Image (spheres, rainbow, N blue to C red):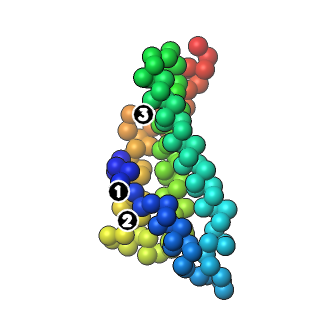
Amino acid sequence: MPSPSAWPSARFDLAHARQRTAFGGPLRDLQAVQLAEMATCTEAARLLVYAAASAYDTGQPDIARRSAMAKLLATETAQYVVDAAVQIHGAPALERGYPLEHLYREVRAPRIYEGATEVQRTIIAKELYR
């Protein structure tokens, strides 16, 4: 997965949505709900990753469950956010060299590394039954 420093910032998406017009108005008015959802999902994933890291650092017994939950939500959120950003940016987002074009291709791999999404769900379910 690319490092966070390689990801386009939320400000980049917000600036684009603020400047671009569609259907007679700024794109931000049409995409406000989607931008809010993207930000909320990203923050939730970030907090779950921090919780898993804290569980690991403090030696809590539920590290496997927390780690699987964090990976599941973070990778699914990354896929959703990149896809939504491509929708907001339109066709140019998929042109070679555009940051989102690279992310659109790269975001799939982390959903497979260290166990596919379905594997993470299985780990979570097994840990819940313990």
Identity of the amino acid at label 1?
Ala
Q: Secondary structure at mark 3?
A: loop
Q: Is residue 39 visible?
A: yes
Looking at the rendered image, the disc whose residue lies closer to the viewer, 1 or 2, is: 1
For residue 115, the mark is: 3
In the rendered image, which quarter contains the C terminus? top right
Q: 79 or 39: which is nearer to us?
A: 39
Q: How many C-alpha atoms fall within 10 Å of the one at disc 3: few (<14), some, or many (≥20)?
A: some
Q: How many C-alpha atoms fall within 10 Å of the one at disc 2: few (<14), some, or many (≥20)?
A: some
For residue 99, the mark is: 2
x and y, in percent, of residue 121 in the image? 55, 31
Instruction: Tell whether label 2 touches label 1 (CB within 8 Å).
Output: yes
The residue carrying mark 1 is 6
From mark 3 to mark 2, how far is it between C-alphas?
26 Å
Looking at the rendered image, the disc whose residue lies closer to the viewer, 3 or 1, is: 1
Identity of the amino acid at label 3?
Gly
- Of the numbered discs 3 and 2, the one sitting upstream in the chain is 2
Q: Going 55% across and 61% down the picture, which residue do you hit? A: 84
Q: Secondary structure at mark 1?
A: helix
Q: Going 45% across and 19% down the picture, which residue do you hit? A: 58
